[in-house]
Amino acid sequence: MNPKKFETNAVRTQAARSQHDEHSVPLYLTSSFVFDDAEEMRASFAEEKQRNIYSRFTNPNTNEFVEKICQMEGAADGCAFATGMAAVFGTFAALLNSGDHILSARAVFGSTHGLFTKIFPKWNIETTYFDIADLDNFEAFITPKTKMIYAESPTNPGLQILDLERLGALAKKHNLILVIDNCFATPYLQLPIAFGADLVIHSATKLIDGQGRVLGGVTVGRTDLIQEINAFARTTGPAMSPFNAWTLSKSLETLAVRVDRHCDNAEKIVTSLLEHEAIEAVRYPFHKDHPQYAIAKKQMKRGGNIITIQVKGGIDGGKKLMDGVKMCSRSSNLGDSRTIVTQPAISTHSKLTVEDRLAVGITDGLVRISVGLEHPDDIIQDLTQALDNLK
Ligand SMILES: Cc1ncc(COP(=O)(O)O)c(C=O)c1O
């Protein structure tokens, strides 16, 4: 039998029906589950019998959500978390010990950078940054203590593209665990496991929800690693709520359709902004001037919904653009149905030193546009009138 396509699996992978034969999986808002007798309870806690015990461990809605993401990412198993950061933290904390060393791409999300610089040093876990555009020198950073490699691609917000195949081969050669945050691409556009990643992380808050409603996170990948992550999460309690899992499972059914439209809109907006006088640079993974365009084309299906523009006038220029939009939202989220503008230097990345910010391409006048699902003409009109005011 031919394997089913992405879109079909997205709508057809679902939890078993209950006695009511419902078509759409219901919401199981329950903290715990009951047992027929003491022996069943004993066997369940002894993990001799697989079943739901308590929603901090598993729940039919979180199980369905994890199963869908595993199906999409080509992963063996997974673990759902309350937020993307809980997934990032839970993955590191479950797998690393005091004295271990992480090799991370320099360009990572601000809170992930905070884990490396403020939290992990307390537990004697050190991080060294490498430049994802310079994998030639990558091996020089590996030490006997290195256990894990961590990176995002495309990066937030610099939109740098990592050569996943090359890093996957390096991880394998040195027997290191490769963890990729696939939040900007989603499994519809990019499959890191196929390029050698051991684990893939998502902030489900972004394109997976896609409508700016709920927070969520998930880690999927190798069974042996996920077992350790699950054991850590069960004990420490960063569980995804059943309501969020139910919402996110429904969202996954439309992921491909939504992401395709996000990409259509983004492509039109890039073309329309390129020549604007108030802009110094436009960056989009599938634009031929992107420095890693060839790599993006090799490993991504389309360019995604994030565009960055560097406006003239530095911090003030960026703020003027942010203040000038009439329809687009000023917010820090991304991957929403509504177009969002964010100036990282004054918000999401304001806690980084100026040197750290500039090292990953976050200039003062950089504005990240998370292209939404409004009609592209309306998004272009709003951005253009705001940019016209900068002249
Ligand atoms: C690339 C990336 N990873 C992780 C996160 C953290 O996700 P959450 O906000 O769901 O904790 C974010 C949030 O913006 C992100 O952009």
Image: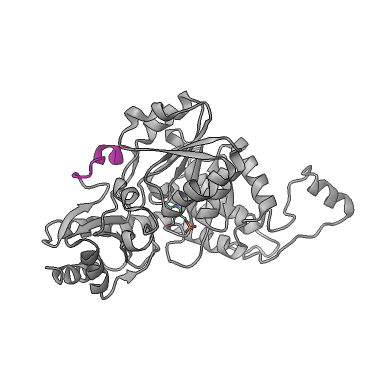
88, above or below 101, in the image: below
| Residue at x-position 68% and y-position 57% | 56
> In this picture, which residue range is highlighted in magenta?
288-298
Where residue 123 sits in the image (x, y, percent)? 59, 43
363, above or below 292, in the image: below
| Residue at x-position 25% and y-position 63% | 315
Q: From where the camera sits, is residue 268 visible?
A: no
Where residue 132 sits in the image (x, y, percent)? 34, 38
Task: Pick the residue in front: 333 or 22.
Answer: 333
Asked if residue 193 lies left or right of residue 78, the reply is left
Residue that extends furthest to the top in the rendered view of this protein: 173
Task: Pick the residue in front: 325 or 69.
Answer: 325
| Residue at x-position 45% and y-position 33% | 196
Asked if residue 302 lies left or right of residue 314, the reply is right
Asked if residue 46 lies left or right of residue 119, the reply is right
Residue that extends furthest to the bottom in the rendered view of this protein: 326
Q: From where the camera sits, is residue 249 visible?
A: yes
Where residue 363 sits in the image (x, y, percent)? 26, 54
Where residue 317 sits in the image (x, y, percent)? 20, 65
| Residue at x-position 18% and y-position 53% | 281
Q: Residue 383 sits in which quadrant? A: bottom left
Quadrant including the C terminus: bottom left
Task: Pick the residue in front: 266 or 14.
Answer: 266
